[in-house]
Amino acid sequence: MMSDSRFICGYFLVGLLSFLSACDNSLEDDKRYAEEKTIESFISTNKLTYTKSDGVYHIATEPSYGYEVNDGDTVKFWYVGYTLSGLVFETNVESVAIEENLNTEVRSFEPLRVIAGETDLITGLKRGLLLTRLNQTSTIIFTSDLGFKGQIVGPIDAWSPLAYDIEVIYVNGKGIQTEKQLLEAMDLSSYNLHSTGLYYKYLIDTSSTRPVSTSTVYGWYKITLPSGEVVEEVSTLNATINLSETNMGAIKKGFMLLSLGGSAEFIAPSPMGYGKKGNDVVSPYQPIAISMRLDSIK
């Protein structure tokens, strides 16, 4: 009888613990949902355009075609951390620290150097950094389950979503070094270098009208690997290219460099092509060659 009682009691306790654990999970889910609504309201009020990955909202406040931050890269960046109510709690920018009356004696006002994905940062910042690029100013926002959760940390209330403004000023890693070696092996002496990092060589330049970032264009382009293998070829005889909806930086900037009736050849580093991931044909950190012609602007 005693054995049965112990069994029933033990079973009850296990069930109670499972119930309490489920309640805790449900509570956290409710808080996360509420925080996501707060974040989305903040984004909507400020009319921001964002992407979301791995639970982190990313807003490119100053777009860039610099190298994407990858796991294992050495990264240096400036940052300002704040709550969505506008309370700044941390920064390595001296002018911001002074303006926000933060203690300047205990802070180092120099770019933070980390190994992406490895240095011990709060989870949201660690994940968010992998969404940024060299020479890009970004805002990353995340819920408290990726921050300090239910802890009160300094002036930060428990269950507070956090935001960080980040400016990445240095990125270097194995993939970047490999691509730089590939570019150095190419004969780029006849090309001009655009500020975006795109190499270009005009075949025909009519000095006529050029498209802008919101233009819709007719034309043709072909993307190849340095080996000559064709990756993609597109003709707009029966369709158009809307530059504002074009994801690949090399195609967008390439057309914007062409004059009406003109043509050119381009060499695009991976940040303007298929990026740090590549695709089924293009390897990560692979520069590509593009031939392009602009027939008309709609």
Image (cartoon, helix red, strand yellow):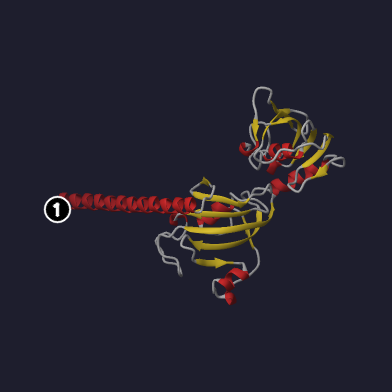
Q: Is residue 160 left or right of residue 115?
A: left
- Could you say which is closer to the camera, residue 20 or residue 44? 44
- Residue placed at 54% from the left, 67% from the top? 90
Tag 1, which secondary structure?
helix
Residue 73: percent from left, percent from top: 65, 52
Q: Is residue 11 left or right of residue 118?
A: left
The part of the image, by quadrant, that contains residue 115 is bottom right
The part of the image, by quadrant, that contains residue 152 is bottom left
- Could you say which is closer to the camera, residue 224 or residue 260? 260
* Residue ID for mark 1: 2
Residue 12: percent from left, percent from top: 21, 51
| Residue at the farthest right position | 189
Label 1, residues with CA under 10 Å away: few <14, some 14-19, many ≥20: few
In the picture shown, does residue 203 fall above or below 276? above
Residue 112: percent from left, percent from top: 63, 63
Residue 280: percent from left, percent from top: 64, 31
- Residue placed at 58% from the left, 49% from the top? 131
Quadrant assignment for the C terminus: top right
Disc 1 marks which amino acid? Answer: Met
- Residue placed at 28% from the left, 53% from the top? 20
